Image (spheres, rainbow, N blue to C red):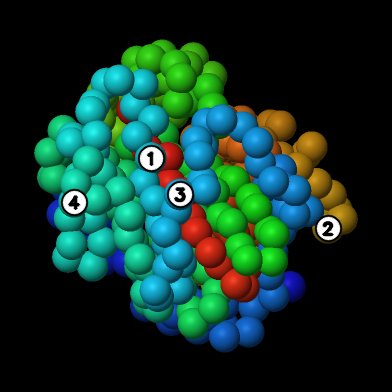
Amino acid sequence: MATTPHMSAPAHPTGTVRTRTALALVLALAACLFTLTQAPARADGPAASGGLITDDFWGDTSDIPPAQNVLQVKVLNRTNGAYPDDQVYWTFNGETHSIAEQPYLDMPVNSSGRMYFHLGSPDGPYYDFIEFTVGDNRFNGNTTRVDAYGLPLAMRLHTRDGYDVEVGDSRQLFTEDRATTFQRFVDSVPEPFKVLAQSQAPYRIIAPAADPSFRPGGANADYFTAYAQSVGVNASTADIFSCAGSLAGDAERCAALNRHVATLPADQQHDPAQFYSAEPANHYAKFWHDNALNGLAYGFPYDDVADQSSYVSHDNPEWLLVAVGF
């Protein structure tokens, strides 16, 4: 099955910019068009079989107004009192509101969109986003850690045919202290990855490709070199983390390298039990899978290989809940 590259919209002005090659951009746009018009529905998450989610984390859904466009989006304050509703903001397509003012967005058809969430002020340093492509009668979207972790985010898609699914960060990330999350990351990853939670603390835990130590000339620039060369790949460590350069169009190979399964037989390269079990591996991505609903996360651009990403896609969308934590 063709894989869908993680989509990148124009970079947020205060965010970590993740560059893509021209080839990767073409592939992403082509995949976006395919998803919008042809891609089959995917069933990800604990309620993918159609059963309703009864967890009170999501609150009452009976009062969500019907959409006039494609689906109704409701933003939920799950900051545990750290920020009141008038300090939790969402931004989409040039429109910004606090959820005290307007918790709903009647989502129109759009391609490669992002919805940003800020705490404290409309452009505050604590922020994150979800991304999506919305067709006439279809929602395709995901949470993402490809660039960085900024805020705990989870989303729940409900459709008119009874499909109901939640993806994103685990309940633990919403309930524990922010400093605890950062420290757990530091404690769980090998030494080269610890800086990712330190260089922009307390605001962000950045992806390895964004840190100078993993780029050419950096202290960890050769982290993946020998392993990649053992399977015939001559790519920089930064390009492996970001699936760029020669790996921009090779989803299977890039995913296998990040998960340290590239030397295994093909049938084992899609087995999650084998992922991240030895060095070198993308321990940044591993942490977000370990702290995600149903283990599904976008830790690197082609993390949807073997259906491991937080991507959801379904026809007849009715509403989408987005929980924003701190």
Q: Which residue is situated farthest in the front direction here?
A: 63
Q: Which of marks 3 and 4 is in front?
A: 3
Q: Residue 76 carries which label?
A: 1
Q: Earlier in the sequence, mark 4 or mark 2?
A: 4
Q: Which mark is residue 97?
A: 4
Which residue position holds label 2? 266
Q: Residues within 10 Å of mark 2 (few under 14, many from 20)?
A: few
Judged from the image, the secondary structure of the residue bearing numbered disc 3 is loop
Q: Which of marks 3 and 4 is nearer the N terminus?
A: 3
Judged from the image, the secondary structure of the residue bearing numbered disc 1 is strand
Q: Which of marks 4 and 2 is in front?
A: 4
Instruction: Mark 4 and mark 1 in contact? Answer it, CB < 8 Å.
Output: no
* Real-space Cα separation, disc 3 to disc 1, in angstroms: 14 Å
Identify which amino acid the numbered label 3 is placed on: Asp
Q: Which of marks 4 and 1 is nearer the N terminus?
A: 1
Q: Residues within 10 Å of mark 3 (few under 14, many from 20)?
A: few
Quarter-of-image position of residue 206: top left
Q: Where does residue 162 sit, x and y in percent of width and height?
A: 69, 59
Instruction: Mark 3 and mark 1 in contact? Answer it, CB < 8 Å.
Output: no
- Please tell me which residue is depicted at 32% across the width and 60% down the height of the picture: 105
Q: In this view, does 183 lie above or below 309?
A: above
Q: Residue 113 carries which label?
A: none
Identify which amino acid the numbered label 1 is placed on: Leu
Q: Is residue 220 above or below residue 250?
A: above
Image quarter hosting the C terminus: top left
Image quarter hosting the N terminus: bottom right
Q: Is residue 48 above or below residue 22?
A: above
Q: Residues within 10 Å of mark 1 (few under 14, many from 20)?
A: many
Q: Nearer the viewer, mark 3 or mark 1?
A: 3
- Left or right? Give the position of 290 relative to 155: right
